């Protein structure tokens, strides 16, 4: 992935995970559009990001639909409770585009317990709502959001799921741009494993009082 060549919308970019990914990708040189339910909130987040990252194309803020319309690549970084409504909002603007869904179906108050939707996982629910014309990949489920917002190494791999290996490869490149190692983890249906693992990691964080446990896949040479 060549820095500065991709316009990326981060839907939910005012939240913790979205803000972290926007920061890392903007720092790598990508043109970032922050998407939010209100354009004013997105514009304020874009100004804060511009102050934190110098050089390159200045980040922009827009409503979710407009952000998706502008971008070549669209990240969806929203809570499960808002997932369906936001996907319906952006669906008319993402046909043929690469959409990267980071959503985990966390259902309060028992967020440390895996609770999958009827479709099997959030990624398959997203594919159903967006339709076959969208190039859907899922990933970034197990990375601590607050760590992405800091200039430090993160001890965590990113499992990347998608039915097209070429689209997965693009996302592996974006993970590298964000300072992470991406791992091909198979078809979109396999996303259930990483989504469920997020709840497991939440429980581990609580049990061991750690600040964002991550995962590492062993036996693969560093790239």
Image (cartoon, rainbow, N blue to C red):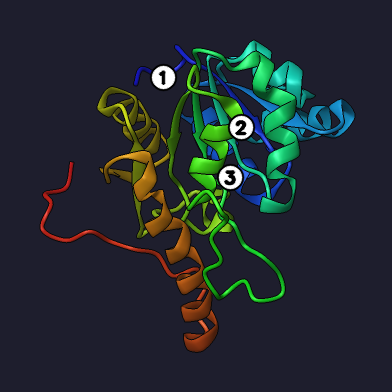
Say few, some or many: other residues with alpha carbon within 10 Å of mark 2 (under 14 / 14 to 19 / 20 or more): some
How many residues crowd mark 3 within 10 Å: few (<14), some (14–19), many (20+)?
many
Residue 20 numbered tag: 3
User: Label 3 vs label 2: CA separation?
Assistant: 26 Å
131 vs 50, left or right, is left
In which quarter of the view is residue 7 placed? Answer: top right
| Whether label 1 touches label 3, CB < 8 Å | no
Q: Which x, y percent locates residue 206?
A: 55, 83
Q: Nearer the viewer, mark 3 or mark 2?
A: 2
Does dot 1 land on a helix, a strand or a loop?
Answer: loop
| Left or right: residue 76 compared with residue 140 | right
Quadrant of residue 217 within the rendered picture: bottom left
Question: Is the C-beta separation of discs 3 and 2 under 8 Å?
Answer: no
In the image, 181 versus 159, the foreground residue is 159
Residue 187 visible in this rendered orientation of the protein: yes
Where residue 44 sits in the image (x, y, percent)?
83, 32
Residue 113 in the image: x percent, y percent?
A: 55, 75
- Which residue was labeled with disc 1? 3
Q: How many labels does the image show?
A: 3
Location of mark 2 (residue): 129
Q: Could you tell me residue 161's position as x and y percent?
A: 35, 41
Q: Which of marks 2 and 1 is nearer the N terminus?
A: 1
Q: State how far apart marks 2 and 1 are (Cα).
A: 31 Å
């Amino acid at each position: 992935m060549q820095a500065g060549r991709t316009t990326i919308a981060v839907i939910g970019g005012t939240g913790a995970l979205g803000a972290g990914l926007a920061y890392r990708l903007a720092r790598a040189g990508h043109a970032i559009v922050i998407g939010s339910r209100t354009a004013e909130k997105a514009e304020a987040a874009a100004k804060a990001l511009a102050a934190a990252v110098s050089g390159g194309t200045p980040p922009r803020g827009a409503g979710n639909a407009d952000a998706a319309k502008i971008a070549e690549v669209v990240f969806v970084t929203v809570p499960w409770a808002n997932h369906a409504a936001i996907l319906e909002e952006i669906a008319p603007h993402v046909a043929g585009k690469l959409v990267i869904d980071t959503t985990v179906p966390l259902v309060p108050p028992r967020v440390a317990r895996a609770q999958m939707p009827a479709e099997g996982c959030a990624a398959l629910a997203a594919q159903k709502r967006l339709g076959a014309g969208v190039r859907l990949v899922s990933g970034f489920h197990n990375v601590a959001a607050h760590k992405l917002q800091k200039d430090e190494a993160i001890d965590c791999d990113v499992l990347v799921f998608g039915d097209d290996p070429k689209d997965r490869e693009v996302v592996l490149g974006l993970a590298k741009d964000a300072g992470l190692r991406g791992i091909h983890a198979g078809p979109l249906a396999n996303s259930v494993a990483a989504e469920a693992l997020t709840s497991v990691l939440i429980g581990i964080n609580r049990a061991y009082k750690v600040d964002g446990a991550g995962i590492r896949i062993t036996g693969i040479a560093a790239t």
